[in-house]
């Protein structure tokens, strides 16, 4: 599924930008791309890339969060392009694009609202749609684990914090005496660390473990 929202932005009469357009592309769950094209009157021979900060917030919320930081590039003299791919915060969201290209120096077109870095010269805001990534592990996976554990004998529970920070599981407030079980967990974690760094088990590791 590919959805595209194209917005043509109004231009201030004092702006060096003669035309501006922003496209919002839904690339699938967890992947939304926003691209901005700016045509400007200043056509320097060489235009160095400049930083672009991309902020998003769910519609109905007021606090923006930084979604990505990228750089501009010149498609041709007088045509600046930038894009970013990020996980949208909600299906319907508001974006804010903050940039200060070298050809816009001396202008102060940003409204200076909370979110854009200090010194931003150009600022664009609009609305978009996307599909946030599904939490990991999924609700179905957690439900399956809960169903399995509920069928087991004895006092059982488990808790998991998913990728969105939500706590769920079965009897998540239950307390257990772990005793030496935690030592095995430390051992496994240490061995996984060695494997991740492609290290063999040394005599010092053996002594520590």
Image (spheres, rainbow, N blue to C red):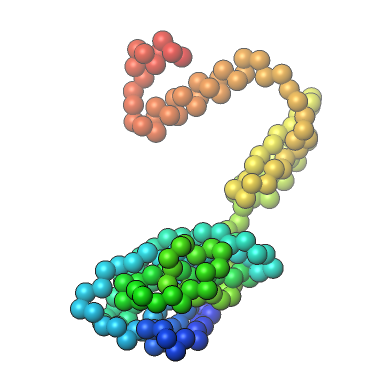
Instruction: Check the image and report above or below for 17 versus 149.
Output: below
Q: Quadrant of residue 92?
A: bottom right
Can the viewer see residue 2 in this picture? no
Instruction: Check the image and report above or below for 147 versus 89.
Output: above
* Viewer-side residue, 21 vs 125: 125
In the figure, is residue 189 to the left or right of 165? Answer: left
Instruction: Check the image and report above or below for 140 versus 5.
Output: above
In the figure, is residue 52 to the left or right of 46? Answer: right
* Total number of numbered discs in the rendering: 0
Q: Residue at x 50, y 60 (%)?
A: 67
* Percent of width and height locating residue 208: 43, 13
Q: Residue at x 72, y 46 (%)?
A: 143
Can the viewer see residue 75 in this picture? yes
Q: Residue at x 43, y 29 (%)?
A: 193
* Viewer-side residue, 39 vs 29: 39
Q: Residue at x 36, y 13 (%)?
A: 204
Instruction: Check the image and report above or below for 109 versus 188.
Output: below
* Percent of width and height locating residue 151: 78, 34
* Percent of width and height locating residue 54: 48, 65
* Viewer-side residue, 90 vs 96: 96
* Percent of width and height locating residue 167: 69, 43
In the figure, is residue 103 to the left or right of 15? Answer: left
């Amino acid at each position: 599924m590919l959805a595209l929202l194209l917005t043509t932005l109004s231009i201030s009469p004092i702006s060096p930008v003669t035309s501006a357009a922003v496209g919002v592309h839904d690339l699938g769950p967890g992947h939304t791309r926003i691209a901005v094209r700016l045509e400007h009157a200043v056509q320097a021979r060489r235009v160095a890339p400049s930083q672009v900060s991309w902020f998003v917030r769910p519609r109905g919320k007021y606090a923006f969060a930084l979604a990505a930081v990228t750089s501009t590039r010149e498609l041709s003299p007088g045509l600046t392009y930038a894009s970013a791919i990020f996980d949208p915060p909600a299906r319907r969201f508001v974006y804010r694009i903050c940039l200060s290209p070298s050809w816009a120096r001396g202008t102060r077109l940003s409204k200076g609202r909370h979110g854009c870095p200090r010194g931003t010269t150009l600022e664009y805001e609009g609305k978009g749609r996307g599909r946030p990534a599904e939490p990991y592990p999924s609700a179905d996976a957690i439900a399956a684990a809960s169903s399995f554990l509920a069928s087991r004998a004895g006092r059982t529970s488990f808790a998991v914090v998913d990728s969105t920070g939500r706590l769920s599981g079965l009897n998540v407030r239950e307390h257990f005496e772990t005793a030496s079980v935690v030592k095995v967990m430390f051992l496994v974690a240490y061995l996984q660390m060695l494997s991740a760094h492609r290290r063999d088990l040394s005599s010092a590791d053996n002594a520590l473990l």
